[in-house]
Amino acid sequence: MLMMDSLIDYILRFGHLNTSEIALIKASVTQIELKKGVYFSEAGAIPRQVGFVVQGVLRGWYYNQDGEDITRCFIAENSLAADYLNLESHQISTEYIQACTDCKLIVFSKAQWEGLSHSIAGWDIIKNKMVQLCMYQKSRKGPVVSQDASSRYLEFLKNYPEVMLRVPLRYIASYLGVTQQSLSRIRKNIS
Amino acid sequence: MLMMDSLIDYILRFGHLNTSEIALIKASVTQIELKKGVYFSEAGAIPRQVGFVVQGVLRGWYYNQDGEDITRCFIAENSLAADYLNLESHQISTEYIQACTDCKLIVFSKAQWEGLSHSIAGWDIIKNKMVQLCMYQKSRKGPVVSQDASSRYLEFLKNYPEVMLRVPLRYIASYLGVTQQSLSRIRKNIS
DNA sequence: TGCATTTTTTACCATTTGGTAAAGAAATTT
DNA sequence: AAATTTCTTTACCAAATGGTAAAAAATGCA
């Protein structure tokens, strides 16, 4: 399937668009590839892009007070990658979004992302539904403090089966809030 | 200050409104009081209201698989109270929003909340900014799995000083993902 | 392929947190 | 005010998790 098609399929889940509107979207975006390790968005800069992941896994992370690398989220196929609130409010981001595997993305510049409102009547509604679902899922699929480490790991397997085999375990450990050693022990005791 | 004024002040932080638009909003909403323990929104029902907290603290919570009462969030003055995604998508909620102290709220019915788009040009934008900020803050001010229990407690004190003295410690414990006994021990060791 | 680097596992012990029980304190009801 | 209920603290021990170190495995690179 063409990269564009997966984007359009995704968008159409949130509202209806006619053929010319779809063409307009296709004309506004850019396709990019990110090699493993390359940053899509960086701390210290004002985010300027919204990405749609066609292939690969990205990782959102930040440095905590002790300088440790903490994974806030994984972003796999058919999801949006963006530090959205800082993008909207023109503020400096404090976290990184980095390709965790080789990735293919479709990118909207901030101007394109927002400008489509002028040419597509329902764009604002679709856009907000997409963003809100993203935020919601990130929080609902994420690790829960009230669970112990094993339960968080099992939930992770359920919620992100497509991520499990493609990213280093140390990132998963930092996502789940445990040391690599603990995660290793947990995996051993479970399987 | 009148209850309405705090609502309008809040809304104006997200966009501009003229006098007649403000009047329109005031005419659409209802003021209510909730006694401690009363539910604003319940699991098993489709949420139908968006509330703005003028006074008091509410608590969002759900039952986990073991039947334990888990606190997802505290909602204090000048915040929105709603199970927003289920409100929007007309789906049955799985969590409760309950008055934790006696509360005063200003309430939009779903119809009013959405209908204002037709009479106020910028309402959609304002509405979405409010909702997105709410979602964002809930996740950013919430407890982080990578921190230990003491750090989570200290962060809570920083992020929700206005809540600390007004809700039972057992709710704070369930919010932080620790037992009451652990929280008690932590508090003893810190102060 | 072979070497260097990174990632993962294992082990040991210290520390933190949970589970159970019970006492004490505070709030609520009668 | 007294009684009841709810909330909080304390104590003890078991279980889970972290810190340090080192070995093993996997990956990337020359």
Image (spheres, coloured by chain):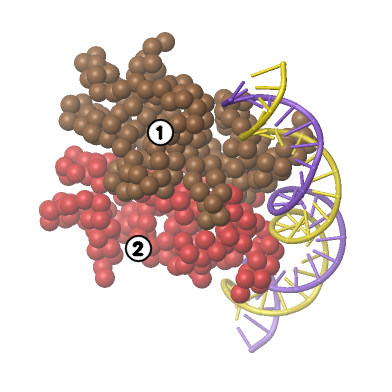
Chain colours: A red, B brown, C purple, D yellow
Toward the viewer: A135 or D20?
A: A135
Determine the secondary structure under disc 2: strand
Q: Which quarter of the figure has residue A150? A: bottom right
**Residue topped by disc 1:** B40
Task: Return the residue found at the far top.
Answer: B1
- A126 shown above or below A79: above
- Quadrant that contains the C terminus of chain B: top right
x%, y% of residue B169?
Answer: 64, 34
x%, y% of residue A158?
Answer: 48, 64
Determine the secondary structure under disc 1: strand
For residue B60, the mark is none
- Quadrant that contains the N terminus of chain B: top left
The amino acid type of the residue labelled 2 equals Val
- A44 shown above or below C30: below
> Residue drawn at (61%, 29%), measured in percent from left and top?
B164
Toward the viewer: B99 or D25?
A: B99
Q: How crowded is mark 1: few (under 14 residues within 10 Å), some or many (20 or more)?
A: many
- D28 shown above or below C14: below
**Residue topped by disc 2:** A54
Q: Residues within 10 Å of mark 2 (few under 14, many from 20)?
A: many
